[in-house]
Amino acid sequence: MTAWQLLLSDPAAPLRLSFMRDAWLVGSLVGVVCAVLSCYLILKGWSLMGDAISHAIFPGVVLAYMIGIPLSIGAFVAGFFCAISTGFIKVRSRIKEDTVMGVVFTGMFAFGLLLFSKIESDIHLNHILFGSLLGISKSQMIQTTIFGVIALGFILIFRRDLLLFCFDPSHARSIGLNVSFLYYLFLALLSLSIVVSIQAVGTILVIAMLITPGCTARLLTSRFDRMCWVAASTALISAFLGVYVSYFINGATGSCIVLVQSFQFLLALLVSKRRSSAKIVIRSSY
């Protein structure tokens, strides 16, 4: 029976499966967290930073397994270390930030691959790189939910400060905001969001979830507050459709979610009538 015939014969089949409902729940939470953060990344111009951290967490995962601690802790520490190292090298050299990111994250990713090749483990490399949303356990689901709620909570609490920091750091500093604190908070939230997304889409595809929703929303609106809502909405839709379609075509769930997001971006690009030079409008609360 083909995927189309299966869909027509029983379109509600995925809704009756508990692991599919769990996948929808986790995928929606991960998608919303990444979507909201993607708006700030685009405003700040740090899209490549998400790519760098998503690859740099791999050695942290392997080291965490060797030590015997939760893999998420090792991933978070490695991601945060990558972000701090990038900023440290940039400040103390004449190399541009995007170049430093490339050097740091490729070096850390290669180090992780080397460690992985030298140890005997039951970790499946494909699960780390590409995720395993349908195979998520209850403990992993709880862990992902807790980290996701924490990340989203901090984004909401510091949303105005982070907005001003990303939009105009000089003005943020002039009105008394602790720019250094906001800098490291933003990096920590980015690392935490990537850790949350590992189980859903893996280290490779997470960069799409950190860029595409914000880009799609940017095509449809120039107001930052609406941009966050649109990005979150597209993330929810892509999580549902991606998981739903993956059931019928027997495909990788994370890849299906990302492909739906890419399709949404192309659709927004076609229907958008705004000029590409339009500026993002924000509401200042200061």
Image (cartoon, grey):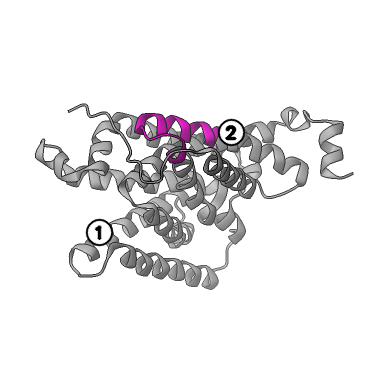
Q: Please tell me how crowded label 1 is: few (under 14), some (14-19), or many (20+) other residues with Cα within 10 Å.
A: some
- The residue depicted at 19 percent of the width and 62 percent of the height is 91
Whether the magenta-drawn stretch holds residue 201 is answered as no
Residue 115 percent location from the top left of the image: 48, 69
SS at circle 2: helix
- The residue depicted at 18 percent of the width and 47 percent of the height is 180
Identity, as a three-letter code, of the amino acid under mark 1: Gly
Quarter of the rendering containing residue 124 = bottom right
- The residue depicted at 86 percent of the width and 45 percent of the height is 2
Quarter of the rendering containing residue 154 = top left
Instruction: Please name whichever residue, 219 or 145, is drawn nearer the observer in this view of the structure.
Output: 219
**Could you tell whether 224 is left or right of 67 in the image?**
left
Residue 190 percent location from the top left of the image: 37, 46
Residue 243 visible from this viewpoint: yes
Residue 70 visible from this viewpoint: no
SS at circle 1: helix
- Residue 87 circle label: 1
Mark 1 or 2: the one toward you = 2
- Residue 237 circle label: 2
Over which residues does the magenta segment extend?
Answer: 218-237
> Which quadrant, please, contains the C terminus?
top left
The main secondary structure of the magenta stretch is helix
Residues at marks 1 and 2 touching, judged by CB atoms closer than 8 Å: no
